[in-house]
Amino acid sequence: MPLNCRQPSEAKGGTIATSRVALIVAFIASLLVSCSLFSTALRFEPVALAVEERRNGFLVELLTDAAIADGAGTMIARPHWLIVTVPDTLLDTTGVATFRSPIVDSTEVHRFETVTQFSLRFTKAISSAEILRTRNNKGLTISVFF
């Protein structure tokens, strides 16, 4: 009986090709699983904005359940812009980006590698601003003077 040398090599080639495909599929599946494990750690915390007018200025509150690290700061871009920089926090900023009120006529949000910046344009000129407190390291209250 003659030997058919092609049949085993074809079968072996098919097995190798199938093994390679299975290996690639397993690798992609492991990447997807590892990404889903880390995605819970990278959950963005929602943040809301509240602005209240006072006699000599405004109170601005960034309301969130996320822990706000020390080092949050404010800066004034004269005459109407207040820029708030929040370090090391993952915040969902969609609510702030669309915020409008009679006191705040536009907002901008910029995310950088290590900080999130909120820019608020007030209808009145600003002279100074300071962070009054963080509510148990959650959220910020900022006093803005005109």
Image: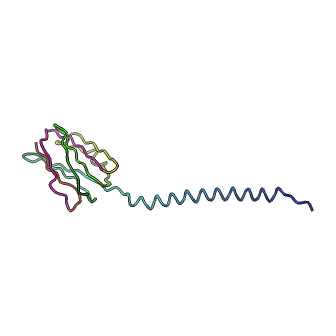
Whole-percent x, y for residue 75 in the image: 19, 44
**Height in image: 51 above or below 22?**
above
Whole-percent x, y for residue 40 in the image: 40, 61
Task: Looking at this view, name the residue that lies furthest to the right.
Answer: 1
Whole-percent x, y for residue 89 in the image: 30, 55
Q: Main secondary structure of the magenta part?
A: strand
The image shows a total of numbered marks equal to 0
Q: Which residues are magenta?
A: 115-135
Left or right: residue 116 versus residue 80 is right
Q: Quadrant of residue 26?
A: bottom right
Q: Quadrant of residue 4?
A: bottom right
Residue drawn at x 23%, y 40% as measured from the top left: 106
Q: Nearer the viewer, residue 10 or 105?
A: 10
Residue drawn at x 56%, y 58% as measured from the top left: 27
Residue drawn at x 7%, y 46% as measured from the top left: 55
Q: Nearer the viewer, residue 42 or 9?
A: 9
Left or right: residue 13 versus residue 100 is right
Left or right: residue 31 versus residue 77 is right
The N terminus: image quadrant? bottom right
**Height in image: 57 above or below 24?**
above
Whole-percent x, y for residue 100 in the image: 23, 43
The C terminus: image quadrant? top left
